[in-house]
Image (cartoon, rainbow, N blue to C red):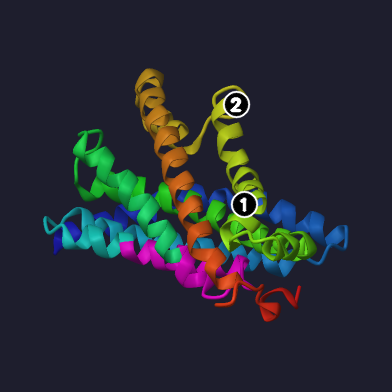
Amino acid sequence: MEWEWEWVLDYLTGMIKPALALTAVLMAVALSYFEKLGLETDMIYSIFRAFLQLSIIGFVLQFIFTQQNPIWILLAYLFMVCVAGYTAGQRAKHVPNGKYIAGVSILVGTSLTMFILVILTVFPFTPRYIIPVAGMMVGNSMTTTGVTMKRLRDDIRSQMNLVETALALGATPRQAILQQVKRSLVIALSPVVDNCKTVGLISLPGAMTGLIMGGASPLEAIQLQIVVMNMLVGASTVSCIISTYLCWPNFFTDGYQLQENVFSSD
């Protein structure tokens, strides 16, 4: 019990610097007030929420890291996937069953990538490695999957005449929206690919920066960052492609016609 209270005390002591860093937020709040942007409440709420969420997850991870049962890894991973699926589905709210499609896509893309990394012994299957790695992959896949689904639906809506003409000429639904599918994938994945092209030249990524600030050598940090970039590209691509395969059947009726109710609202 004494040991448990000791790390709680260490945590509270370590929060002195984050508290001092609130000065930057106060500066932003002051600027928003004087410029009449109206963002003061949102800024304060967002920072308070981030502080609360990170504090809670910090204690949760501290508990999980001390456990030997792999079920805790799976529970933490599934929780992240559920939240990510809901968030991505909210972005693509006009896509039927969008939350479920996003959740399944993220689950398959990230779990497949994770399985490959573990099988190849890139990472050991321990909470200290798997949970942070899974968090990065799930978060990135959440963003790209949400963009893919929303863009696909919006593109089909803006080009309904072309799609309906292709259907009238005998094309299957998949063939009729093939160009829209490709365009949505390219748009969603382009930021990930561009980030790989410029990593280290414009900014130092979070994982690499954290290692360096934690005392690791820059060469060790670079090695890990290369692994991170590889897995993000793989997980995001798989998740996005699966989301398109799960999305398009919901855009058509059994008679191969576009669902008017899906495209009738903005």
Using the numbered discs, state the Cα–Cα distance from disc 2 to disc 1 in whole angstroms. Answer: 30 Å
Q: Position of residue 128 (x, y in %)?
A: 25, 46
Pick out the residue farthest to the front. Answer: 169
Residue 149: quarter of image: bottom right
Pick out the residue farthest to the top. Answer: 219
Q: Is residue 193 magenta?
A: no
Amino acid type indicated by mark 1 = Leu
Q: Position of residue 138 (x, y in %)?
A: 42, 53
| Stretch in magenta | 78-102
Quick one: SS at disc 1? helix
Amino acid type indicated by mark 2 = Thr
Q: Residues within 10 Å of mark 2 (few under 14, many from 20)?
A: few
- Which numbered disc, 2 or 1, marks the residue closer to the eye? 1
Against 110, is 146 above or below?
below
First-in-chain label (2 vs 1): 1
Residue wearing tag 1: 178
- Quadrant holding the C terminus: bottom right
